[in-house]
Image (cartoon, rainbow, N blue to C red):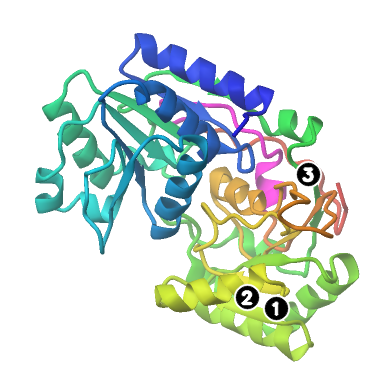
Amino acid sequence: MRLRPRQKTFVERSLAALGTRTNTLGIAPTGAGKTIMLSAVTGESIGDTDAKACVLAHRDELTEQNREKFGRVNPAITTSVVDATTKSWGGQVTFAMVPTLTREGNLAAMPKMDLLVIDEAHHAVADSYRRIIDRVRETNPDARIFGVTATPNRGDKKGLRDVFDNVADQVRLGELIASGHLVPPRTFVIDVGVQDKLKSVRKTVSDFDMAEVAEIMDRAPITEEVIRHWQEKATGRPTVVFCSTVAHAAHVAEAFNAAGIPTGLIHGDLPGEERRSILAAFAAGELRVITNVAVLTEGFDHPPISCVVLLRPSSYKSTMIQMVGRGLRTVDPAEHPGVVKTDCIVLDFGASSLTHGTLEQDVELDGHTGAGEAPTNTKGAGF
């Protein structure tokens, strides 16, 4: 697989940093091809040696996706998996799910690693990741750590410096839009009369209190307005809707279906098989809209999505970036024949866009974040 010029530069800079340091962080927005670049850096680092690497992810879907794309980039390198059902370190590169690997017995069985790769590396300072990192360092003090993320600034404002003390490269969203590798967002901030109420919602450590948000947003008249605006501005577009609670997501899905718009519901308590079935129906076009609660924020990849609906505020900019990023990927005509996509409509009913402004992020490894400027304050304005 050939890398695009900007991807190649990212890989070269990451390898150069790993050549002189024990760790480095690469930053690239959703749609930049993070998994492809991660795979290339891993393959180049260990390909002609007997070194071993482990690639971490925190969900089954990401582990499977990373392994599949790694194989396309590095077909000659053997791989294995450590997850809930399989625990093999036989490959030169092992793809491991963090909740499984962090268990004491599984961690004790981990062989010496020369390279630890952390996908969605903003999670790296969590206790579960730190246990894995400490184990890698104990067995090999010379091991290198490479992280990739779209959102280096964590919601809880914890810095990443304890794990990563430098940034090898940062690909900016504007670069990829200008080069045609992402589509531009067209954002409509829509006031349905609740913006003042949303501003007064209590904040928790991780986000706004979503039970309070649901009391404001999970009302039939508001959901009717959501559907009306969707039909007016984005009708027919493959759409992901981010809701506050499971009940809210269920009510929104019911309302879309009642309006004759085939809609599915995804949430964290669904069995994996059922979740995969719903996502497959969405990918096949049998469902036009999919509602969810915090499940499709990271790692979900379906390029034809061209509308994102925000029915909840985001107290942290990184969450907003992850949600909107679901709709910014371009479409490969070979993979999705007949699909034309030139932009992504963002219908923001939660006013995150007013709070956080631009989707670009300045990197603060020490954990300080800024809010950014709001692009506009006009009711229903597109930009």
In this rendering, would 35 be left or right of 49?
A: right
- Quick one: quadrant of the N terminus? top right
Image point (45%, 46%), residue name: 66
Q: Amino acid at mark 1?
A: Glu
Taking the view exactly as shown, the residue that stands out farthest to the bottom is 258
Query: SS for tag 1?
Result: loop
Q: Which residue is mark 2?
A: 281
Which stretch did the figure color magenta?
352-368
> Splitting the image into 4 quarters, where does residue 116 fall?
top left
Q: Is residue 152 visible?
A: no
Q: Main secondary structure of the magenta part?
A: loop
Image point (82%, 44%), residue name: 376
Query: SS for tag 2?
Result: helix
Q: Residues within 10 Å of mark 1 (few under 14, many from 20)?
A: some
Whether residues under marks 1 and 3 lie with C-beta atoms below 8 angstroms apart, the answer is no
Whether residues under marks 1 and 2 lie with C-beta atoms below 8 angstroms apart, the answer is yes
Taking the view exactly as shown, the residue that stands out farthest to the top is 20
**Which label was assigned to residue 383?**
none
Foreground disc of the pair 3, 2: 2
Q: Amino acid at mark 2?
A: Ala
Q: Which residue is mark 1?
A: 286
Q: Which residue is mark 3?
A: 183
